[in-house]
Amino acid sequence: MSEQPKVRTTEGVVQGRRRQGHAVFRGIPYAQPPVGALRFAAPAPPHRWEGTRQAVEFGPAVPLSLPIDVPPQGTDWLTLNVGTPDPGAAGLPVLVWIPVGGYLSAASSDPMFDPAALAEAGIVVVTINCRVGAEGFAFLDDVPPNRGFLDQIAALEWVQRNIAAFGGDPGRVTVGGVSAGAGSVAALLTMESARGLFRRAIAHSVPALHSTPALARQVTAAFADRLGAAAPTAEALRDIDPWHLAAELTSFNAGLHAHRESWGRLTDTGTALCPVVDGEVLPETPWPALTAARASGTELLVGHTRDEFRYFSVVSGRYGTFTEEDAQAALELHAPQPDGARAYRAAFPQAGPEELVETVYSDALFRMPSQKLAEANAAAGGTSYLFELCWVAPALGGILGACHSLDMPLAFGTLDSPVATQLIGEEPPPEAVALSRELQEAWVRFVTTGDAGWSAHRPGGHLTRVLDAESKTLPYPEQTSRQIWEGHAPTPFDHS
C-alpha cells in the first residue's frame, strides 16, 4: 500500500489520504476556534503544532440556523479541505469554494461539493467552513461586523501561504460560491482586505441580501431581546450555547413576517441576520462599487437558473397556491420603485398570480443581482461570462423546473449526491450527464485560463450561455425583466 500523502503547511505537517486518483486533506484549521474570549471576534491565526496532524476527517460543522437536526460536533469550526491532483505538482490552478447557503449554513462536507471530478481535471479544490447566522452576521455593538466575510478572507490568506505546498499556484486562485456563497464572492470583489487574494471569481445565483446598519441594529436588538440578553452585544451573548443560539435564530427567522410593517423586504427572505453594509468591512454593495469604479473588475463567471424561486415554493408547500393578494404583495415589496409593479403587469399581461410571484421573486432575489453583477464587473474593466440554466429537473414530474441549486451537482459532477438524486433522480438521464460535462468543462477552462468558452457579456449585446439539452449562446433570455430593472441596482434592506 502506498504511503499516505503528507504536506508541510506554515502551521505544521498534515497527512491526508489518496482517493480516486487524487489526494484529499480535510479539517485543516485556518484560524483558531471562535469560542470563549474569541467568540464573535475577528478570526485569530491558527496555532502551530508539532508532529503530524491527521487530516482525514472533515472539521466540525458550524452552528446551523436551519430547520434540520444537526448535533453539535465540536468547536473547531474554522477549517478547510484540500483536494489536489498531486501534492508534488507545481503551478496548478486553484478553486476556493465557499459553500454558504442563506448566510445560515456552511457545510464544506456536503457530498455535492466533492472535488473528485475537478481534481481529475487538474484543479486544486479548497472548500471552507466559515461562521454564519448569529455567529457570523449578528450586528453587535462591541465586535466587528460581517465576521463570516472575515473568516473567508482568513481562509484565502491561508491559501496564499500554503497552496503551493499542495501543488497549487497562489497567483491563479478562483474564488467561487452559489447563493449566499455567491453573495460572499460578490462582496469579496469590493473589499479592500480581499485585494490580491484571488484572481478570478465564479458566482452562481447571486442574492441581494444586505442590510443597512440601522435595520441590522434593530433586528439584532429584537433577537437579543428574544434571548433575554441585556443588550445586543457579544458580551451579553457570549455565554449562550452556540447551537442554542442557532436554534433560536431558526425560530426567529420563521416569524419574520410579523415584522413586515417595519422591516419590509427583509421579512420575505427568511434571513434576519444577513451581511451589513457597515462602511468598513463591507464598504458598500458590489453593484454601485463596481459600476462607479470604486472596485476593480476581474474575470467573472456568473449566472443563475431560469426558475430560481420554484424550489422554495415547492419545498414550502406554496407551489400552486399563490393568490392575487400574494402577487400584489410580492410586486409592492420587491419590484423596483416607484413603478416596477405596474411595469411587471404591463410586461406580463397574461400572467396569473403564480407566474407573477415566481417571476418577481426570481428576479429580485437572484436573477437581476446576477445579471447586474455581470454588467457592473464589465463596467469596472473586468470580463464577465453570463449563463442561465434552463434544463428542467426531472424529479417530481418536472415541476421543479430549472430550479435553484440544480447547477451545483452538474458543475461538480456529483450526480450521485443526495441533492442531485432529489432533483435529478437516482439514475441521471443522458442529458444530465452531458450537461454536467459541459458545465464542468466551462469551469475548468475558466479557472485555468479565465475564458469560459463563450462570448463575454457586454453592454448592448448581453450575450448569455443558455445551458440546456442543446446549449446555445444567445441574447439574455430574461430581457423583459432586465428592462424593468434598467437603472435599478439592488439596494440594501432598510426600514419599511
Image (tube, rainbow, N blue to C red):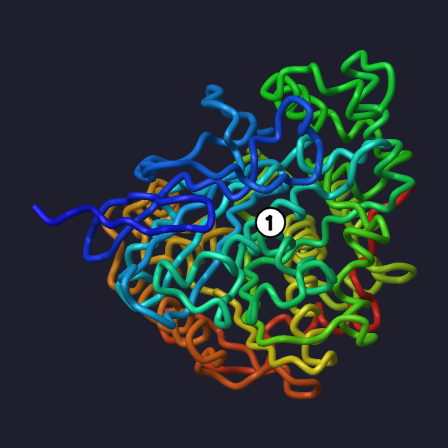
x, y percent for residue 157: 57, 55
**Dot 1 corresponds to which residue?**
154
Residue placed most toward the observer, 349 or 151: 151
In this image, 82 relative to 374: left or right? left
Q: Quadrant of the C terminus?
A: top right
Residue name at image x 29 percent, y 59 percent: 87
Considering the numbered disc 1 on the image, is that residue within a helix, a strand or a loop?
Answer: helix
x, y percent for residue 31: 56, 40
x, y percent for residue 85: 28, 62
x, y percent for residue 164: 41, 63
Residue lying at the far top of the rendered structure: 228
Residue name at image x 80 percent, y 76 percent: 293
Above or below, 258 relative to 361: above
Above or below, 48 relative to 228: below
The answer to whether residue 396 shows anywhere in this view is no
Above or below, 476 relative to 12: below
In this image, 278 relative to 466: left or right? right
Q: Residue 193 is drawn in which quadrant?
A: bottom right
